[in-house]
Image (cartoon, rainbow, N blue to C red):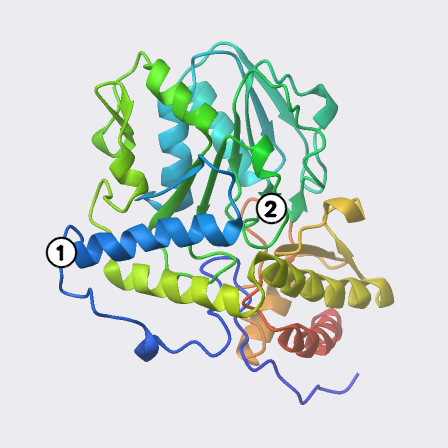
Amino acid sequence: MSRPTRKPQIPNFSSGPCAKRPGYDVARLDLSALGRSHRSSLGKQLLGAACSETARILGLPAGYRVGIVPASDTGAVEMVLWSMLGARGVDMLAWESFGAGWVTDVVKQLKLKDVTRHEADYGELPDLNKVNFDHDVVFTWNGTTSGVRVPDGDWIADDRAGLTICDATSAVFAMELPWHKLDVVTYSWQKVLGGEGAHGMLILSPRAVERLESYSPPWPLPKIFRMTSGGKLSEGIFQGDTINTPSMLCVADYLDALAWCERVGGVPGTIARSTANLKAIEDFVAAHPWISFLARRPETRSNTSVCLSLDLPAEQVKALVKLLEKEGVAYDIGSYKDAPPGIRIWCGATVETADVQALLPWLAWAYEQVKA
């Protein structure tokens, strides 16, 4: 085939940090807090707004709390695992790299004994019907490194005794989450809204707060993991009084992203944008037999981290990725290091569908080049 001429206007398809929102300009951020203490009234106001605006835009149920914590989504998950687990048995779900990492933490670091593992290979989900909701349940909503997501929340028991702890970093703002079924949700700014890194978001239901206030784990907790004081929740964490020093530049960036989310129709708007991006790739895959989704079933396909397999050996896949980067049409689309060889195209809400559509002919062209 002939070499395409139209290129994506923004060729950033990395799965994190992700593309900035359309029209983004760092010079337009509200930088009034730069050089000021995050403990100042202005700093606390902006940090508090990041929490309260998140709750409002996501439509969280009454009583749910939103906090900003250290170390991105990873830090948020670790805080929860070390602070809440051990009160009852745990069911751990894993079908890709990050879920497997949480299993390692619980089994080898916390060394919990009553652990049931539900695991599946890349491209598949474990049997969700076997999950025991008398236990705490830890799972990712969307497997960023496999492109496999849970299809919905119907499998989660409403009358559960344990807590549901959900790593949703590449699902929040892009997929419908049944908040009443989720007791703990974590995510990071650099995913669907294209924010900057280093900060984690922690969402707690009243049931999760009750666990924190009624249970003390038998192991020591580092300062940055502690969410209670004197047996009560440290409410300041969820009102802008962060545990450690945040970047106020990153906070300004996140508030800008939240405002953009509202302008495109809120969460329904960002979900629609991600879904349209996935549809463009689905149409392309349907027309080209040499490429397929790593997710085996359509209902489990991620609409953010779209992972694809090519009928090429690993070295030729790498050559294709390098060729697309050299041509300036797709940056950072190689599959995750632990995943099967392939490509991963980020389709979150900050990516324009027109850019996905412009990329796809180049993908077909590059395939013919490296295959020759």
Q: Position of residue 244 (x, y in %)?
A: 21, 43
Figure quadrant of the C terminus? bottom right
Query: In the image shown, does 239 or 168 lie closer to the viewer?
Result: 239
Q: Position of residue 342 (x, y in %)?
A: 66, 56
- Count residues near mark 2 (Cα–Cα under 10 Å), then give few for <14, some for 14-19, many for 20+: some
Residue at the image position 47 percent from the left and 57 percent from the top: 16
> What's the mark number on residue 37?
1
Query: In the image shown, does 361 or 63 lie closer to the viewer?
Result: 63
* Amino acid carrying mark 2 in the image: Ala
Disc 1 is placed on an element classified as loop
Q: Position of residue 326 (x, y in %)?
A: 54, 78
Q: Position of residue 324 (x, y in %)?
A: 60, 74
- Count residues near mark 1 (Cα–Cα under 10 Å), then give few for <14, some for 14-19, many for 20+: some
Where residue 40 sits, quadrant-wise, is bottom left
Disc 2 is placed on an element classified as loop
- In the image: residue 311, left or right of residue 5: right
Figure quadrant of the N terminus? bottom right
Q: CA distance from mark 1 to mark 2?
A: 42 Å
The residue singled out by tag 2 in the image is 339
Residue at the image position 71 percent from the left and 86 percent from the top: 3
- In the image: residue 201, left or right of residue 320: left
- In the image: residue 209, left or right of residue 98: left
From this viewpoint, is residue 188 visible? no
Q: Which mark sits nearer the N-terminus, 1 or 2? A: 1
Residue at the image position 60 percent from the left and 80 percent from the top: 8
User: In the picture shown, does residue 47 fall above or below 237?
Assistant: below
From this viewpoint, is residue 290 visible? yes
